[in-house]
Image (tube, grey):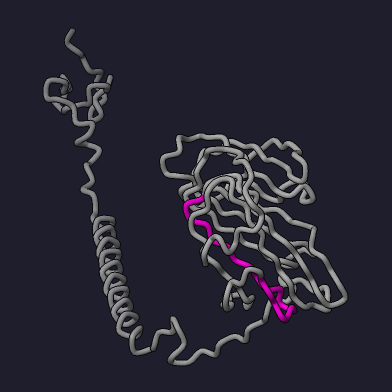
């Protein structure tokens, strides 16, 4: 698509010398609201020194952006705080980003509704230079006779069933503006997000994606079961052996030491009866045989 074919709004003074490496614009009328959802996916130039301040204009009728976020290296998005200034038919958003990846979303309520015909105009004000710009327009699910001026060519189905018209514009210099006009037939107020198709569940068979046959799994199951039984047998043997060893130790009898040996006095402590000569215990005062009083040498 030649850029001159798209340029219908003339030129305006650029708002900033900042360069966008790429910018993709999604235009989805009557998607999840009766308005037109507009999404900007922006990548700043790789040479941009971060953090940096960015300004961007959205239509005054849109009010505030629905979402303004920066994207981290892990793919997660985080909201950005911003200030806004009304400039004629526009609201200028001013914010500081720590990332070169940005996403801005807003709802434009300027969709004209007739009894059957819907009409909308998108306008790019030309605030920044864009090295690679692309635009996609989603046809509402219950709409027919979709027309886009200038033409985007044939549509392609999305995964959710919506028909998508896409155009890779390429380089757009700062100060260059253009318009895109949508026209389609729609006789109801149903939103696309509420008319998602319910797809039947695929029956499982041998050809179903992700299905694994029994012949493939069985060897692994048997191998794992064999290893488990082997480990259980070794553990059982070790437990039984330990119990038997403890039982044998507990059954061993201890050798009793006679009390006489424990209290056997030394030969130096023996006492003898002066009358009958019998040996007496050191603590005896009288002979246990003849009854004679024992004499203890001092």
Position of 82 compared to 210: left or right? right
* Residue for point 12% across, 20% down: 268
Q: Is residue 173 above or below residue 33?
A: above
Closer to the camera in the image, 223 or 85:
85
Closer to the camera in the image, 262 or 146:
146
Q: In the picture, residue 150 is in which quadrant?
A: bottom right
Closer to the camera in the image, 178 or 140:
178
Q: Residue 169's x, y, as percent?
A: 52, 61
Q: Quadrant of the C terminus?
A: top left
Characterize the magenta stretch by its predominant secondary structure. strand
Residue projecting furthest to the top: 298
Q: Is residue 151 above or below residue 95?
A: below
Q: Residue 73's x, y, as percent?
A: 46, 48
Q: In the picture, residue 78 is in which quadrant?
A: top right
Residue 8 lies in magenta, yes or no?
no
* Residue for point 20% across, 14% down: 295
Q: Is residue 148 above or below residue 255?
A: below
Residue 133 lies in magenta, yes or no?
yes
Q: In the picture, residue 190 is in which quadrant?
A: bottom right
Position of 278 compared to 79: left or right? left
Closer to the camera in the image, 272 or 226:
226
Q: Residue 289's x, y, as percent?
A: 23, 30
* Residue for point 14% across, 25% down: 266
| Segment colored magenta | 130-148
Question: How many dots with numbers?
Answer: 0
Q: Residue 119's x, y, as percent?
A: 77, 68
């Amino acid at each position: 698509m030649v850029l001159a074919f798209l340029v219908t709004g003339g030129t305006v003074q650029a708002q900033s010398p900042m360069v966008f490496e790429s910018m993709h614009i999604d235009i989805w009328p009557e998607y999840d609201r009766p308005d037109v959802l507009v999404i900007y996916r922006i990548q700043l130039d790789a040479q941009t020194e971060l953090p940096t301040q960015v300004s961007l204009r959205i239509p005054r009728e849109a009010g505030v952006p629905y979402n303004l976020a920066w994207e981290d290296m892990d793919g997660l998005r985080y909201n950005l705080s911003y200030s806004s200034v009304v400039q004629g038919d526009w609201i200028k958003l001013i914010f500081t980003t720590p990332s070169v990846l940005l996403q801005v979303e807003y709802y434009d309520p300027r969709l004209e509704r007739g009894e059957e015909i819907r009409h909308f105009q998108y306008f790019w004000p030309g605030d920044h230079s864009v090295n690679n710009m692309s635009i996609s327009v989603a046809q509402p699910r219950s709409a027919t006779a979709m027309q886009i001026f200038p033409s985007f060519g044939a549509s392609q189905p999305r995964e959710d069933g919506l028909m998508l018209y896409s155009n890779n514009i390429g380089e757009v210099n700062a100060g260059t503006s253009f318009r895109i006009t949508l026209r389609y037939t729609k006789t109801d107020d149903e939103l696309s997000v509420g008319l998602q198709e319910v797809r039947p569940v695929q029956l499982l068979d041998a050809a179903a994606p992700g299905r694994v046959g029994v012949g493939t799994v069985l060897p692994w199951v048997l191998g794992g079961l064999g290893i488990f039984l082997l480990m259980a047998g070794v553990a059982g043997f070790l437990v039984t052996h330990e119990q038997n060893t403890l039982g044998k130790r507990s059954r061993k009898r201890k050798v009793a030491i006679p009390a006489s040996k424990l209290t056997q006095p030394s030969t130096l402590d023996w006492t003898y009866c002066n009358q009958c000569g019998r040996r007496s215990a050191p603590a005896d005062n009288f002979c246990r045989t003849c009854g004679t009083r024992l004499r203890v040498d001092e």
